[in-house]
Structures are given as structure tokens and as C-alpha cells.
Image (spheres, grey):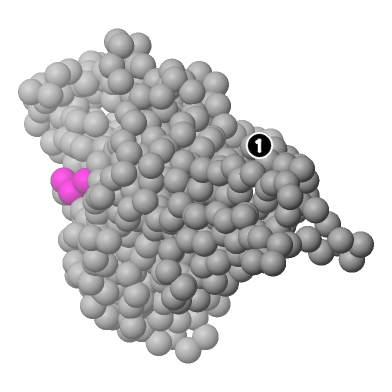
Amino acid sequence: MSFAPLTRLPLQASIAVAAALLGAAPAAHAQNISYTLQPGENLYGLAKRLLHKPEQWKQIQLANKVRNPLRLLPGTLLMIPVHLLRPQPALVTILHAIGDAHAALPGQAKELPLQKGQQLPQGSQLTVGEQGFVTLQLADGSTIRLPANTQVQLSEVLYAPASKDIQATIQLDRGRVESKVVPLPSANSRFEIRTPHAVGGVRGTDFGVAIGDNGAFLNDVREGAVQVSALASHKPGPHALVHAGEGSRLGTADGQFTIAPLLPAPDLSQIPSVLEDVSFIELPLPGSTQATSYQVMIASDNTFNQVLRYGSFAPALVRFTGLDDGDYQLAVRPVDPQGIVGREAVRPIRVKARPEAPFMQQPQQGSQLFTTAVDVRCTENPGVQGYHLQLAHDQGFQNLAADLSYLPACSHTAHDLAPGAYFWRVASVKSTPDGARDQGPYSKPASFTLLPIPPKPPTPSIHADGASLLSVQWGTSQTQGLRYRVQLAHDIAFNNLLDDSVVDTSQYVRPLPPAGVYYVRLQQLDQEGRGGAFTAAQSVMVPGRLMASDQQPVVSSDGTPLRPGKP
């Protein structure tokens, strides 16, 4: 087939022609592609333009059994060994993109938003803004992750499918790049991350490069090794091989080059395996005397190419916006005072925040109730079939006072509860499409206290046959600081009270009321003046009496009151 020189074509055309040429290669076990010699071409010029080295024209001569290379005619069909082909411009694929992420393509002024599956040519400039994250894949399968606040340029991306050789240079202008590079097949391959100050080159590794304060070059190596070299304009700058488990910092102002062991992976054992908040992801971070911060990622895949949340946090707490219900992978890395990212700890987490728990209405947090029956109420959650209510004596809900797995409405009255502290919580329940029970997380527990209710006093004895006093007696005279409420009423419902008194003895005495039927009941009070149950109402008959002008009863010689109609 004919092949126009790549160097004479525009970039997009060059990529198309290269893809056509390389795509013409046979299956992996085949060794050659065909090429039709063009007017003015010779083997040396062909090798210089298409192969790794100009002197490889001799291998084309041998492969095609050309006796006299000076007498080749235009139109001659040549077979070119595929392993000799120099890598050609290749496209970079967007594996994953979320948040604010754009690309400026070569020759185009307008930026395009990045989307999964999009392909970018070399020369593209990518910008990842706040809350963004992008994962790229090169033609050889290597991946590059770009977290938030990062800007890079795909300076060079060349690939030869037959030999798997790749030549890639990523220019990092701001932020951080994380690369997982497929082992390079030969010395013809090259992969490097450049910053304005230094370059990190690899032959197959898992590493990160970042621009730190004042433009410092930072890198951390998790697998393999990275050759770090300063970009000096006039003389060779500092350089060193940074191995797995090490990180380096190359300062811009002082030129100081330091290599240090990566901080150990943090302990994630205190992070809960199930997260139940629909609004936020909150995770406790271990305290550290070495780490100044932590880098945290949450991804939907084990390779962390599909990162959904990424951020840097001071020790103590991670806080992200909420995620959909599902299974995720969490990765946490410590960052040392130099800004070098340490070893990574990974663990699975699950988000189960739906169906959402209803809002709790009563009893409210910290309530003190003076009753043995508690009304529990919460809001109704549309779209659910019922509620699971738990009432416990402890905050861990191990000692349950009530466990109602299905309530059609979010309300319940708990009876005969003993005094003490209680905790309650509630979860929404719905059915999955296949009819299975799907219970969401419990609401945050609320506590309340049932105060002791004073016991009912003993049944009183009532006397109204004296000359002038009504006496009510109960229990013993030793009340030990107890107080009682005594009610005297004209009616058994105690709506028309004649007296409502509090006494601190076990006796109540008052002047006799006018003749008639009256009702008496007692109630014991606590120290705060709260009363328990009343005794049953008792009636008392006050007989008629003859009264003197001073409103004192008229009595006989033995002191007995004289009644009307009696001598």
C-alpha cells in the first residue's frame, strides 16, 4: 500500500495515516506489513522516516532480498518487519471524567468538556478543576490519573502496536499526576512526567509526581523506580534513581534534592464498613505525629480508575458529599511535611443510606417525662411501606425494651415502662422489586428519661363527727420528707374543689365544711412537686349542726354537737 510521509501532513491527518499503516499489520504472530515505494524514495530515506534508525534500511533489504538497492523502481512492493517501525502519533482515551474537566485540542481555541470514551491527540492540554477527577489510558494500557486542580499537556504520545513501543511525555504545569505504567518492552520506549523544574522517567512503575510549594518537584514511588533529573539550562543538575517505597523532593530556590522513605500506610481499622448518612461521607482519620495531611480517594473499582471522591484532609476527619448506595473502595495516603505522599492503605466500604430514616418528632432528645406510657412519633416517609422501631435501655441497643420490626405508621405508644434512661431510633422499610425486605439505616438515637412516679398513698381514714374539724389520716406519722396533695371536692370528678392543699405530714385537718356530701383523694409528690397517682375518691357525710351567732357549733354538756331537730 502507498504511504505518504507523516512529516508532511497536518496532525490529524498524520494520526489517521499512522493508524492506517499500523492497523494494516497482520495478527500478532505475523512479522511484516507491505509498502509501495514512492517516486524519489530509496531504502535509506524510507528507514530514516519510518524506522527507529536510518541504518535499519539494510534489514529491509535482507527481508525483501534486494540485490541492488540503487536500482529499485517506484511501485516496488516491499515487506517491512513490524518490529522496526517507529512509534507514530496515538490517541489517548478518557476512561473516566467527573466534575469540572476540560481539554484544549491542538489548533482549537475553544475548550471541550471531557467525557468518558473521548479520544485526544498529542498536544492536547487538560485542565481539571475543583471536585474533578480524570483517568486517561494510553495506547499500551498505561493509565494516568489527574485529580482536582491539575493541568497537564500531552506533549508527546507515540505508539507502535506491533512492538508495543511507546514514547510518552506528559507536561505537568499544576497539581499532581498519578501514573501506572505498563513495563516498557524495549529501549526504544520512553515514559516521563515533566514539570518546569524536573523530569521523572520510568520503564514501568506505579508512581506520582506533583508540583509543591514554590514549584518544587515531588514524587512518590509505589512500584518500580523513577529516574529524577533536574532540568538545568546550562549544566547537568541533580539526578537520582528513586526506588519503590521512596519519595523525593527537588526544591527550586535552593536546588536541594532529598530522598526519603515513604510514610507507612495508615491504620483504617476504625473506619466503619457501612456508611449510613445520605448527605455526607464522614470518616475518622488516625492521628499521626508524622503526617501533616492525608490524601483520600473513593472509587467504584478496585483499580481506582473510576475515582468519585478525592481530597486532601488534615488528620482527624474526612468529609465528602454523599454517594449513591453501593460498594466502593477507599484509599488513604499520608503526606509528610515535605509534601511527599506516603504508602497507601485500601479497604472496602459500603454506602447504605436508603431508604432514608424519617425525622424523629417525639420524645425529643433529652426529654424528661413523668409517665409510664410514652408516645413515640416521627414523620412519614413517602415511598416506604413501614418502619422498624427500637426502644432500648442502652445507647448500643443491646438491651431492648421494644423491638417492633414493622409498623405501618411511624407512631407507637409504649406502656408500663419503668423509670430510667431510654434510647430510641427508627428505620424505614420498603420492598425491593423482587419483593425482598429492604431496610434503610436507623436514625441517630435520641434519648429521654422517665422520672420515678411517687407511689399511691395508703387509703386514708376520714373523720367528720367531731364538733368542728374534718380529719383525714393515712399511713404513719413518720413521712421522712414526703409531701402529699389533698383534694376536697363537692363532686366525685373533683371539678368543683373546696380545698387543694399540700402537706408534709400524714394527716390533714381542717374546719368542717357546711353539711353535705364531700369527696376526698390523696396524691404523693416528689421533690420537684410532681405528683403520682391519686387514691380512689372517698365520700364523707358532714351532718347538719346548730350554730351559735359566732359561727361556732352548739354542743351539749358532754361536748357533742347538737343537730337540728335533736334535743
**Residue range highlighted in magenta:** 181-185
- Can you say whether 342 is above or below 277 in the image? below
Q: Report the front residue among 237 and 561.
A: 561
Magenta portion: prevailing SS class: loop
Q: Position of residue 103 (x, y in %)?
A: 57, 40
Asked where in the image residue 343 lies, by quadrant, the reply is bottom left
- Can you say whether 477 is above or below 414 in the image? below
Asked where in the image residue 510 lies, by quadrant, the reply is bottom right
Q: Position of residue 138 (x, y in %)?
A: 34, 39
Q: Report the front residue among 366 and 221.
A: 366
Question: The residue under label 1 is which amino acid type?
Answer: Ala
Please report the residue visible at 10 percent of the width from the left and 21 percent of the height from the top: 30
Q: Report the front residue among 447 and 73.
A: 447
Q: Which residue in the structure is indicated by mark 1? A: 493
Asked where in the image residue 68 lies, by quadrant, the reply is top left
Q: Report the front residue among 512 and 260.
A: 512
Please report the residue visible at 34 percent of the width from the left and 31 percent of the height from the top: 404
Residue 192 is covered by the magenta coloring: no
Viewer can see residue 129: no
- Can you say whether 406 is above or below 299 in the image? above
Please report the residue visible at 15 percent of the width from the left and 29 percent of the height from the top: 81
The N terminus is located in which quarter?
top left
Q: Position of residue 326 (x, y in %)?
A: 34, 33
